[in-house]
Image: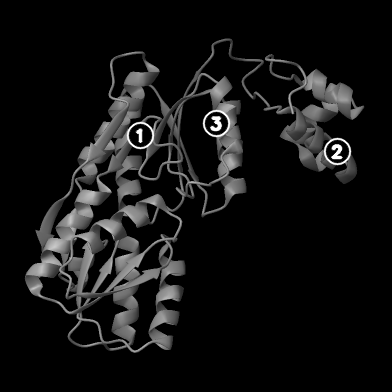
Amino acid sequence: MNTHGSKPPTINDVAEVAGVSSITVSRVFTSPEKVKAKTRERIMKVADEMGYIPNVFAQNIKTVQSPIIGIIADDTFNQSYSYVIQELCKLSETRGYSVMIFTTQGERTSEAKAINTLVGYKAAGIVLSVISDSADYDTRHLKVLNGSHTRLIQFDRQFDEQLPAVYVNDRRAGELIASVVNDKAYKKVLVIGGPKDSRITQKRLTSICENLSDNIEVTRLYADYRYDHAKEIITSHFSSNEIDYDAIIGINGAISLAAKNVATRWMLRGVEFLSIDEIPNAEDYGFYFCCVVHDYKQWATIVAENLIAAIEDRPWQERTMINGFLKNNQ
């Protein structure tokens, strides 16, 4: 808790409360191995309670921003994330910015550390795809952005649907997939989403189900956006249930790939696959399917150009929705 009003706490403030020297506090953040464990833990506890963020540029940079842009994503296995990283790095270099990349692997503590690091470095901007887009996701660790000069754009998953973001039209994607299912006259369909409390999952699943014919039997399975976790959950479902689906739909590329992998091991026959988002490199392995495609290059370019425009105080579009289109690879 910051007990110094609106003024950010300094290293001297932390030292005073912790009963140590400012040099000892500095060592905790620069060379923690040089500080005794109990002293280090006490200082970290005080710093956390005061809301202290170490500013690594404090002695060298007098400006409010550094030429750094950060990308924080849950899992870079996601093909769209890799496009954003490539495009943002390319555009950033031409404008004199450097890019720092953080992969959180679904850990809130990792996400918090990444945010704190970038704010500490006075990053000019952050592209953030949060680990959870559930309505009750604890975002207290993101409040440090409110008092900084760092610009933020949410990418794909959103913790706040009012803040700047570039995101997919999830309902439209569901409508397109449902139209294919109806045309194919499938009778039994398995739809695999991410976490049950994910807003993206609910929007896509709801849109698919609302637009399906009444005579189609739908089974919903909630899995995970990360490939390995999704594969475990799908494997468990296949092991515990009679698998007689006409079609299996994954609501993103990683989930669809996991479903295809499990189905291949189960040697399922006659089951067709559909996906929202492409399955990475599927055609290289002879796998052809119907999917809703979003132009990743366009997506990445919008993120990069808008963020840099915001940093440089030029006109920019704060919220952009990307519409997908059907691609039939069957």
| Pointer 2 residue | 42
Circle 3 residues within 10 Å: few <14, some 14–19, many ≥20: many
Q: Which of pointers 1 and 2 lies earlier in the amino acid sequence?
A: 2
Q: Please name the amino acid that badge 1 sits on.
A: Ala
Q: Which of pointers 2 and 3 lies earlier in the amino acid sequence?
A: 2
Q: Does residue 252 appear anywhere in the picture?
A: no
Residue 228 appears left or right of 208:
right
- Mark number for residue 165? 1
In the rendered image, the quadrant that contains the N terminus is: top right
**Of helix, strand and loop, which one carries label 1?**
strand
Q: Give coordinates of residue 24: x percent, y percent.
A: 84, 29
| Pointer 3 residue | 118
- Give the image quarter of residue 323: top left
Q: CA distance from mark 3 to mark 1?
A: 19 Å
- Give the image quarter of residue 204: bottom left
Q: Of circles 1 and 2, which is in front?
A: 1
Q: Give coordinates of residue 89: x percent, y percent.
A: 35, 35
Q: Please name the amino acid that badge 2 sits on.
A: Arg
Q: CA distance from mark 2 to mark 3?
A: 24 Å
**Of helix, strand and loop, which one carries label 3?**
helix
Q: Of circles 3 and 1, which is in front?
A: 1
Give the total of numbered labels: 3
Instruction: Tell me which residue sits at (22%, 56%) in the image.
Output: 174
Residue 287 appears left or right of 86:
left
